[in-house]
Amino acid sequence: MRAMTLALILGMALPGLAAAEEIGSVDTVFKWLGPNHKIVVEAFDDPEVDGVTCYLSRAKTGGIKGGLGLAEDRAEASIACRQVGPIRINEKLKDGEVVFKERTSLVFKTMQVVRFFDEARNTLVYLVYSDRIIEGSPQNAVTAIPVLPWPVAQ
């Protein structure tokens, strides 16, 4: 009960984070009981930068534990962010700001995406990684978007 209360409190303490929309998935391992192991592709829009959408692919553990939300997902993830419209920055950006966070185990492990702005190159940089309260993982992926003018339709 305490673990669920802690997870609820932590979830409420992170306002302004993007919510992901599942684009699709593929099964990787058949499970007799519960859902199969799979790779999911999700999309989310940067909450502070209009015109940017990020796509994540990551493993989701199936089986009985996975179906009940008790399994720990692997730390690997891939990210690709793209300009999908005119880029407009809504607030002053903070380097390393978390723009997306999702629980990948019952309580202790999360996957998150942080944003940096490379001012010298006028480029937004997004980093995805997994962390755990006790020990994180060095596995990560990065993508970058140059801030360019968006062509106007004639």
Image: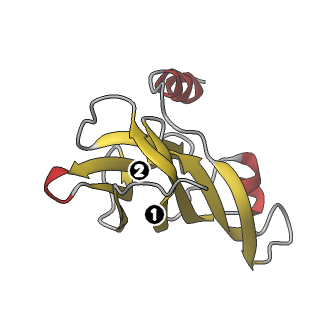
Left or right placement of residue 147 versus residue 24 in this view: left
Quadrant of res 22: bottom right
Residue 105 in view, yes or no = no
How far across and down, in percent of the image, does residue 90 sit?
39, 30
Which amino acid type is shown beneath numbered disc 2?
Val
Q: Which-is-in-front pick, marks 1 and 2?
A: 2
With respect to residue 114, does 16 lie above or below?
Answer: above
* Image coordinates for residue 146, horizontal then vertical, percent: 33, 61
Report how far apart the C-alphas of labels 1 and 2 lie in the structure.
Answer: 13 Å
Which residue appears at 45% of the width and 22% of the height?
13
Q: Quadrant of residue 89?
A: top left
Q: Quadrant of the N terminus?
A: top right
Within-10-Å neighbours for mark 1: few <14, some 14–19, many 20+: many
- For disc 2, the marked residue is 113
Checking the image for residue 150, the label placed there is none
Q: Nearer the viewer, residue 116 or 12?
A: 116
Q: Kindly identify the amino acid type of the residue bearing the numbered disc 1.
A: Ala
Q: Which mark is residue 75?
A: 1
Residue 4 higher or lower than 22, as above or below: above
